[in-house]
Amino acid sequence: MKRVVAIVGRPNVGKSTLFNRLVGGRRSITDPTPGVTRDRIYGEVSWLGHDFVAVDTGGWEDISDPRASGELVEEIRRQVRVALSSADVVVMLTDGREGVTGMDEQVAQMLRPLGIPMVLAVNKVDSTAQADSVSEFYALGLGEPIPISAEHGRNTGDLLDAMVAALPTDEAIAEPEGPEPIRVAIVGRPNVGKSSITNALLGDTRVMVDEVPGTTRDAVEVEWAWEGHRFVFVDTAGIRKRARIDDQIEKFSVSSSLRAVRNADVVVLVLDAGEMVTEQDQRVASYTREQGKAAVVVINKWDTVERETGVWEEYLSIIGDRLYFIDYALTLSTSATEQLRIMRLPQLVLEAYSNYRMRFRTSDLNRAIRQVVEHHRPPGKRGRSLKVYYATQVSDGPPTFLLFVNDPELVTMGYRRYMDRALRAILGLNGTPIRLLFRLSE
């Protein structure tokens, strides 16, 4: 496994800006508002032949500060402690413009007894003249301060050199052999229980949960192994209606969630059993289909539903009617708080992923195509009828089939939809879309 470097410090010293600089992209939200980063955000860093994982953490605040929400601040502090427990190196980041503060001293006091290699960085030092004033940071007792500007990239190479030098020199544990982990994006509206499901599944408070909608701001990646399979669960920010996205932080949160869908193998769309399908859920479902992703629909908070005969069938009917974009999705009812059917979720994810990556022999595919066509003959158009001569699979993820026909313009939208549903049924492709391409047979 790769070594881990945790970036810690008080709020608004530039931890997320430094994290983004190190990983080479905008993975973590940056904003002048203190407390924007709340969960632990992970990203891979490569420097001069050394690879490690950087962890961006929330700002360490004093829980006694009356301006802060006590429960939320304590949860941020807990997330920081979890990050430190798995870190091989810690980078404490401070603000060179403000100098050493009482909160910096609290953070340093918390770090010193841990026995983890430390690197002290002083951020927002944009000139040589400013660099001369960083000597006061020696008082923190964490070694030589390195002046940097995360925003402009000044001296970040020196910081990376120090980070690599502090990494343990013993041989790293070998990376697990086998296929790449299955990437699972957990999406949905705010407060439907996405983070609670992730935590219940993993058996640990790996992402933050709070009654206030919007607690999750970034897309938080969590690695997990289960029954010989490796996963990366991406817990995303709640996706609100576009009209309600009224600040830059939330706009980036939504953008991060949509990027998680694009990068996923399987999308888990979480619904609230009390509210069911909204217009925004439909947009997410449509985007999932547009991106060609496997899907599982989870109806959470099932413990709040009256258990009557036929109620599940009623819910399935609602889903089928309003989420027709992903009519291929597998479905599950859960209660994260009651641990109800939580462990069915990885089973369904694996089923959807297996079908998403399915490959078929050409002979089996053409046999299925013949069944589809014989069951419902193509309609005529301008006195001509569509003829399908031959089919082959050209890719997976999702399964994509190329059909050679007498005239691609004879394929109506209705018949394309029929072939899509019928072929998925015959081939047993539950949980994944398919793509049908039509080409003129020469």
Image: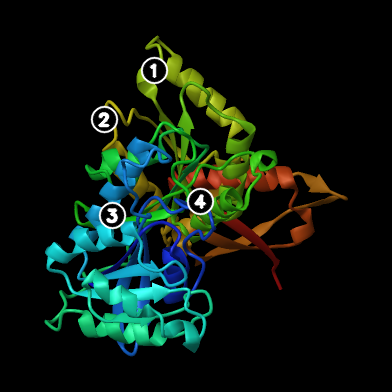
Give the residue at x 26% y 43%. 205
First in sequence: mark 3 vs mark 4: 3
Q: In this view, does 167 lie above or below 288?
A: below
| Labelled disc at residue 304 | 1
Give the residue at x 39% y 35%. 210
Q: Disc 4 or disc 1, which is closer to the eye?
A: 1
**How many marks are shown on the rendered structure?**
4
Q: What element carries label 4?
A: helix
First in sequence: mark 2 vs mark 4: 2
Say whether residue 4 is visible: no
First in sequence: mark 3 vs mark 1: 3
Q: Disc 3 or disc 4, which is closer to the eye?
A: 3
Looking at the picture, which amino acid does disc 2 mark? Gln
Image quadrant in which the C terminus is located: bottom right
Task: Tell me residue 283's x, y (percent).
Answer: 63, 42
Q: Disc 3 or disc 1, which is closer to the eye?
A: 3
Mark 2 crowd level (few <14, some 14–19, many ≥20, 10 Å Cα): some
Looking at the picture, which amino acid does disc 4 mark? Ala
Q: Tell me how far mark 2 sits from mark 4, CA to CA.
A: 40 Å
Q: Please give left or right for residue 238 compared with residue 334 in the image.
A: right
Q: What element carries label 3?
A: helix
Confirm or deny contact between disc 4 and disc 1 (CB under 8 A).
Answer: no
Q: Is residue 16 above or below residue 226?
A: below
